Amino acid sequence: MEVQIKSIEPVVLASNEELLTPEYFWALARKIDALGLSRLGTTSWLDERLFCWPGEILNADGTVFQLHEDIIDDAYGWEESFSWNSNVKKIADSGPKRRPNTRLLLRFQLWDAAFKIDADPIILPD
């Protein structure tokens, strides 16, 4: 009897252009806020989703998104308190005042992947 192993569909990240829109930032802020976790708990949630995922993560162009052990620290600029997690929750109510800075792209990619892994993707209105 042959055992068939079902492959896991890869997670495909949104395009960089979509990730860096104010609409995406606001939707992300609401999702992070809805987790109801502490600042460090939020980062732990992100870490668990990314590093327990047995499948691949692909960029929007189909290339493999490379996770490495320091990627969360890289995304957060090695700021150990992860204060951005608390700050972004404030945006959940009012929305961002401006377009997000491109230095947030890696952070947004990680969060996009995590919510997709959790089967709760960020979906922007058409």
Image: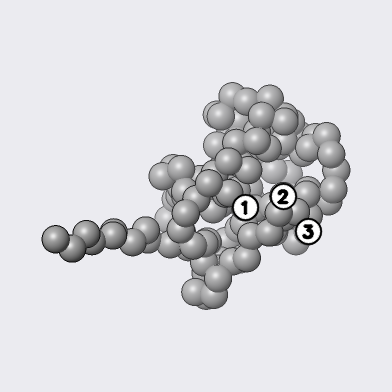
Q: Nearer the viewer, residue 102 or 37?
A: 37
Q: Which mark is residue 110?
A: 1
Label 2: element kind: helix
Q: What is the residue that sits farthest to the left in this orientation?
A: 1
User: Label 2, label 3: how many angstroms apart (C-alpha)?
Assistant: 13 Å
Foreground disc of the pair 2, 3: 2
SS for tag 1? Answer: helix
* Residue visible at 50% across and 50% down in the picture: 53
Q: Nearer the N terminus, badge 2 or badge 3?
A: 2
Q: Going by the image, does 120 lie left or right of 80?
A: left
Rendering coords of residue 81 (x, y %)? 83, 34
Residue 101 vs residue 115, the one in the foreground: 115
Q: Is residue 59 above or below residue 20?
A: below
Disc 3: CA contacts within 10 A as few (<14), some (14-19) or many (>=20): few
Q: What kind of colouring is applied to the model shown? A: one colour
Residue hosting label 2: 72
Q: Image quadrant for the C terminus? A: bottom left
Question: What residue is pinned by disc 3?
Answer: 103
Task: Name which residue type carries label 3.
Answer: Arg
Secondary structure under badge 3?
A: helix
- 1 or 3: mark nearer the eye: 1
> Which quarter of the image is occupied by the N terminus?
bottom left
| Kind of residue at badge 2 | Ile
The amino acid type, in three-letter code, at marker 1 is: Leu
Q: Name the residue located 18 percent from the left edge and 63 percent from the top edge.
A: 2
Task: Answer left or right for 92 relative to 76.
Answer: left
How many other residues sit within 10 Å of disc 2, few (<14), some (14-19) or many (≥20)?
Answer: some
C-beta proximity under 8 Å, tags 2 and 1: yes
Residue 120 relative to residue 106: left or right: left
